[in-house]
Amino acid sequence: MQKVIHSDNLKLALQARGWTQKDLAREIEVTAQAVTNWMQGADFPRPDKLLKLATTLKLNFADLVASSTKDQPVIAFRKKGGAKTTDAHILKAIAMGSLLKPLVPYLPELRSLRVQIPSPTTQYDALQATAAEVRARIGLGGQAVLSYAHLIDQFGTNGAVVVPVLWGEKQNHKNALHILLPQEQVTFIFLNLDTRLEDFKFWMAHELAHVYTPGLAGTEEGEDFADALAGALLFPKSLAEVAYPQAVRHSSVTGEIRELQRYADEHSISLFTVFSEINRYAKAHGLPDLRCKDTDVHAIRNVSRGKLISETLFEPTPPEPTAYIAAAENVFRSTFFIALKRMIKEQGTGAGYLQQIMDIAMQDAVTLHGELSR
């Protein structure tokens, strides 16, 4: 079902402000005819105008848009720290998802047989059993290093299209974005390359958990499970039960943290992940927590960070479009730009479409569009 503006709610919002349709058009910088077309269901706002419409009238997506819930994109954010996800963020992401639908026919055929976790739970023993099954599927033992190449393979075999993006290290609200198109049965996963390796692997594992549990995508339960499975995949019980006695034998917090850091470096994951998983192991087995606290761990992390993924992939940064597209295809095995190139050549799709679906600056979209148009 095609999305249309919920005209009754829009009229009520205008009446509450004493506005006419012309007033609204002037406020959001469109023509009066555009507003009329939205109200009559003859047209639907572009994502930037939809977002401006929602924020101006203080309406959320459910109030503003009348659509089939079956067809509505399902959104899950992997946020930066304690950043709050607002209705505006959700609205913008859903609009991105709607715009991605026309791209789906240009994707290579995706595998229909996909792995799903039937009864996801954060209960320790069950979660560890699930992590062990995923590792076995990948071909890894319990103490082997899980690389992001292993995770990329799982995305590709489970109907997920990875979209590596350069959103900046601090400027963007999100560090990963999961958009599931339920009717098309395709998932797009946007991963910010301006991210430290030790965090990047966790976010990828988190997103993979969403792929395995599509029924939980976009829910708090889904976020909790995805975080829990990510930690268990990167530092499972078989590692924690070895690391715990090695850490607690140290008589000082400094020595304990040094032991945890050794494991973090060996597995290219964050010190906090090691700390958290060892403490979860201890709690599940009735053992005392580590002496060090999360504040100690965060203090160390804040002064000792690895390179950004973008810095390891590209020299110099930001990369030229050719290098960026090549990395997407060769490193992340993404079919996203292959599909975009087909769409551009067949439909004459413009740079504005790239700007909207990738949430990037128009100048970057124009440069990228020029490369894909060749």
Image: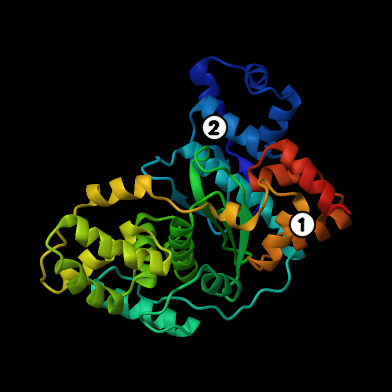
The residue wearing badge 1 is: 340
Quadrant including the N terminus? bottom right
Q: Nearer the viewer, residue 304 or 204?
A: 304
Secondary structure state at the residue bearing disc 1: helix
| Residue 192 picture location, percent across and down | 56, 51
Q: Which mark is residue 54?
A: 2
Q: Can residue 311 be seen in the rendering of this structure?
A: yes
Q: Is residue 247 left or right of residue 140?
A: left
Above/below status of 367 relative to 306:
above
Residue at image position (66%, 54%) is 314
Q: Is residue 137 left or right of residue 302?
A: right
Residue at image position (33%, 68%) is 263
Above/below status of 139 relative to 283:
below
| Residue 39 picture location, percent across and down | 66, 33
| Residue 256 picture location, percent across and down | 20, 61
Q: Is residue 202 left or right of residue 365?
A: left
Instruction: Name the amino acid type tagged 2.
Output: Ala
Secondary structure state at the residue bearing disc 2: helix
Q: How many numbered marks does the figure carry?
A: 2
* The image quarter in which residue 209 lies: bottom left
